[in-house]
Amino acid sequence: MARCNWTLTTGARSRQPRQNFEWFLYASLAALVGLAAWNLALVAPLWREHTSVIPDPANSRFLYLAVFGFIVNMILGYSLRLLPTFLGLRPARQALVLPAFVLFNAGVAARLLEGPLASGALAFAGMAVYILALRIFEPPATYVKSRGVDASFPWFIRLA
């Protein structure tokens, strides 16, 4: 019988050093797994009661985890990996990536534990440190070949 090569075992055997952007991707995937389990826990009682309304605060917490825990973490991870190349940015400040990751995800956790004020402050601080780490508003380090691309593209990406 052929042995299956699962993604996790392949990644674990890799000899390449781990990169900081991967923390955001792993957090995103963990949020996705958590969302799948939580979705089952939320939907099972609805099926028994023949209703389609998920009551608050469970609904708002679920949506917050979906948006900030899954989607935003994925965007932050890929942005950290790809934007320096696409925009010709200076290399990211690696020493700031872990604090940004911890602050942002502590904000996500605080929101799930009913701490909206702490959540907002932590997530905001995490994003501020992330912006400093990514160096997105600093002048580019190299000229980016953008023949055929609208001149507003770099600013559109920075503001997005």
Image (cartoon, helix red, strand yellow):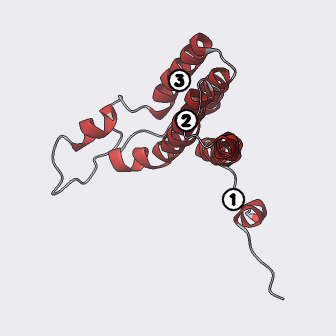
Question: Of 44 and 79, which appears nearest the observer?
Answer: 44
Secondary structure of the residue carrying numbered label 1: loop
Residue occupied by mark 3: 129
Q: Percent x, y for residue 4?
A: 77, 77
Measuring from the top left, give residue 35's x and y in whole percent: 64, 43
Which one is earlier in the sequence, the residue at label 1 or at label 2?
1
The amino acid type found where label 3 is placed reads: Val
Residue at the right extreme, as displayed: 1
Mark 2, secondary structure of its residue: loop
The image shows residue 55 at horizontal and vertical percentages of 59, 28
Which label was assigned to residue 53?
Answer: 2
Task: Find out whether the residues at labels 1 and 2 contact each other: C-beta distance under 8 Å.
Answer: no
Picture disc at residue 16: 1
Task: Point out residue 142 in the picture as x, y percentages from the top left corner.
Answer: 33, 45
Q: Earlier in the sequence, mark 3 or mark 1?
A: 1
The residue under label 2 is which amino acid type? Val
